[in-house]
Image: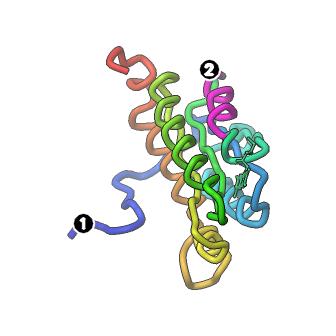
Amino acid sequence: MAASGRAKQDQQLDGSKLKIAIVHARWNEEIIDALVDGCVKRLLSVGVKKENIVIETVPGSYELPVGAAALASDVSIDAVIAVGCLIKGSTMHFEYISEAVSNKIMDIQFKVGKPIIFGLLTCLTLEQAKARAGLIPGVMHNHGVDWADCAVEMASKYGADFRTATWK
Ligand code: RBF
């Protein structure tokens, strides 16, 4: 039976030769700190060297595509993880920002030929965000861990071919 929810890893991850950038928004600090922490710990545990983890920030999630594109243009970086947390309020900002960011991140990875990992939580409540950042014990795991796995898997499996692919 296919795994549901968290994607099942089909190979041993080895990040020892990779350089990974994380760009994160500064809104919803408690959530972001937990997600970035989960992400960094996982990158280290799958072999990415401390000096090969680059962390940069942008003001809010809307700025993530610009930050991600700038980092991805550095030839030494193999993948970028864009981390943000949008919490739905009473106006339409949530819809505009989440759609713009998700579309642009997809677009950038095809332009630069590098994986840009979508680490944007789009939550209806703060409670949902806390759960997905692993801040409510026993409820959900820290999704930053999945994004680290995703970056290492995509950069190792598809990085080189994707960078040079002519069909992009
Ligand atoms: N940025 C986030 O990363 N998370 C949010 O929950 C968030 N909420 C916002 C709510 C409103 C009403 C506005 C105007 C902006 C919000 N932003 C949020 C900031 C946004 O991503 C961006 O930094 C600013 O709009 C400047 O371009």
Compared with 79, 153 (above or below) is below
Q: Is the CB atom of the residue marked by disc 1 within 8 angstroms of ligand 1's nearest atom?
A: no
Residue 41 horizontal side relative to residue 11, left or right:
right
Image quarter of residue 58: top right
The residue tagged 1 is 2
Compared with 147, 131 (above or below) is below
Q: Residue at x 53, y 35 (%)?
A: 104
Image quarter of residue 133: bottom right
Estimate the x, y position of residue 67 in percent, counting from the top left. 69, 34
The crowd level at tag 2 (other Cα within 10 Å; few <14, some 14-19, many 20+) is few
Tag on residue 75? 2
Q: Tell me where the magenta segment starts and ends, as one range.
A: 64-73
Distance Cα–Cα, label 1 vs label 2: 37 Å
Q: Which residue is drawn at 79% across and 44% down?
A: 59
Tag 1: amino acid: Ala
Q: Which structural element holds mark 1?
A: loop
Closest to the observer: 120 or 2? Answer: 120
Estimate the x, y position of residue 10 in percent, counting from the top left. 34, 54
